[in-house]
């Protein structure tokens, strides 16, 4: 039996657009704490706020976009996001103090939330239903590629040049994405009057897809753990005198995701989510533990491999779970719900952890995050994993369900 075609022109254009958006995001995310501390004389908690407030803006935008993207139109929403993303990137050139940086970071995060929610919703409509796990896994590699190149370029330009060079590159990338989106044909959804009425008002289900909430709750804590890497690995590698190895951390991290994604996506479709999710928690937790115990470059980079397998697999698989659990006409809402929760964890993490670092130090910080991720194994089982087991038992001819 022939498989439905996955690698279409529209799939590739949307993935390339996503690469460029995330490149601009990562260029600034991994350098903003250093910029705030070195150029604006911010404390670790203030620098963490400058980093994390971006994700808070992203979270709020995703909530609003999720309820309106199908009414406005997916491609129109993507254009709106890209234009505003470009405009807020240009605002960085006028920063004169920490307060202004924090405001711009919030606005910049909101525009990123519009872009990334639109591209994620568009691709979910392009991918054939029977290849959704595999398709989203491949699509997520676009953000993964950006997570390797973006931080590496950002840290390189930060060491060899200045912050303005990073901003110029980000502006160029967003401008290119605006150009290629013109050639993207987007499958739009025509809502019935009843479905339009459902999106009106301020009921909770007009902002969140309730069926996507269980897996999204798990993602908050996974995002919280990942935020310790995204915001502080640059500073931490300087403290333990592993700057050279630290500059390659995200290259190694992303490479492991690129290697694992082709088979983890297929295994998700063939074996089910539990077969993939439990190992992802274990690998990410071990990776965080290794960061906290790293005394040489090999251990630090090996931790990047494990976190790539763990965190990278979790994100694509959990996103697939959120979409599969939800009705087709609420695909945009499911996408925004999932990313709003995980962004909330990534966003609030740097601010909270910034207060803990002076007390605990960086090493104990990463060990603590390993414990948090290990605890997510039990949380996932309670919120989703046991339902998968019950469903399999029922489909296998048994009416028994696990409680």
Image (tube, grey):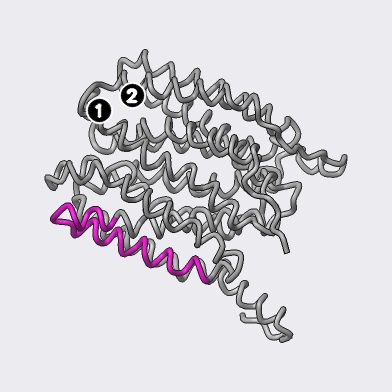
Asked if residue 183 is positioned above or below residue 253 in the image, the reply reads: above
- Residues in magenta, as a range: 275-303
Side of 89 relative to 95 (left or right)? right
x, y percent for residue 134: 58, 56
Disc 1 + disc 2, Cβ < 8 Å? yes
Q: Is residue 294 magenta?
A: yes
Q: Quadrant of residue 49?
A: top left
Between disc 1 and disc 2, whose residue precedes? 1
Q: Which mark is residue 31?
A: none
Residue sitting at the far front: 2
> Callout 2 environment at 10 Å: few (<14), some (14 to 19), or many (20+)?
many
Q: Which mark is residue 158?
A: 1
Side of 209 relative to 221 (left or right)? right
Viewer-proximal residue among 189 and 144: 144
Name the residue carrying label 2: 166
Viewer-proximal residue among 203 and 94: 94
- Residue at (48, 47) in percent of width and height: 141
> Callout 1 environment at 10 Å: few (<14), some (14 to 19), or many (20+)?
many
Q: Quadrant of the N terminus?
A: bottom right
Q: Quadrant of the C terminus?
A: bottom right
């Amino acid at each position: 039996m022939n498989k439905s075609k996955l690698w279409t022109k529209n799939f590739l254009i949307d993935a390339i657009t996503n690469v460029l958006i995330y490149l601009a995001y990562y260029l600034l995310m991994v350098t903003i704490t250093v910029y705030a501390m070195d150029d604006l004389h911010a404390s670790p908690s203030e620098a963490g706020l400058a980093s994390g407030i971006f994700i808070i803006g992203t979270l709020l935008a995703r909530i609003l976009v999720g309820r309106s993207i199908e009414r406005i139109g997916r491609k129109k929403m993507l254009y709106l996001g890209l234009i505003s993303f470009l405009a807020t990137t240009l605002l960085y050139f006028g920063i004169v103090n920490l307060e202004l940086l924090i405001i711009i970071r919030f606005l910049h995060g909101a525009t990123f939330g519009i872009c990334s929610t639109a591209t994620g919703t568009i691709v979910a409509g392009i991918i054939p239903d029977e290849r959704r796990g595999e398709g989203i896994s491949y699509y997520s590699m676009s953000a993964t590629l950006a997570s390797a190149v973006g931080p590496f370029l950002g840290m390189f330009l930060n060491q060899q040049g200045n912050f303005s060079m990073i901003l110029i590159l980000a502006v160029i990338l967003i401008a290119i994405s605006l150009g290629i989106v013109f050639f993207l044909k987007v499958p739009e959804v025509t809502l019935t009057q009843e479905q339009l009425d459902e999106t009106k008002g301020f009921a909770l289900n007009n902002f969140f897809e309730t069926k996507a909430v269980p897996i999204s709750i798990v993602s908050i804590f996974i995002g919280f753990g990942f935020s310790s890497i995204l915001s502080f690995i640059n500073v931490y590698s300087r403290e333990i005198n592993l700057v050279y190895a630290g500059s390659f951390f995200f290259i190694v991290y992303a490479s492991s995701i690129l290697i694992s994604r082709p088979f983890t996506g297929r295994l998700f479709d063939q074996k089910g989510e539990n077969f993939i999710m439990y190992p992802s928690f274990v690998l990410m937790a071990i990776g965080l533990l290794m960061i906290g115990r790293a005394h040489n470059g090999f251990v630090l980079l090996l931790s990047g491999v494990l976190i790539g397998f763990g965190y990278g697999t979790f994100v694509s698989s959990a996103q697939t779970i959120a979409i599969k659990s939800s009705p087709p006409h609420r695909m945009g809402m499911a996408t925004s719900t999932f990313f709003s929760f995980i962004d909330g964890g990534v966003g609030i993490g740097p601010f909270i952890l910034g207060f803990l670092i002076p007390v605990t130090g960086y090493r104990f910080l990463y060990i603590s995050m390993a414990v948090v991720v290990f605890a997510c194994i039990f949380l996932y089982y309670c919120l989703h994993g046991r339902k998968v087991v019950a469903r399999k038992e029922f489909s296998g001819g048994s009416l028994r369900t696990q409680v």
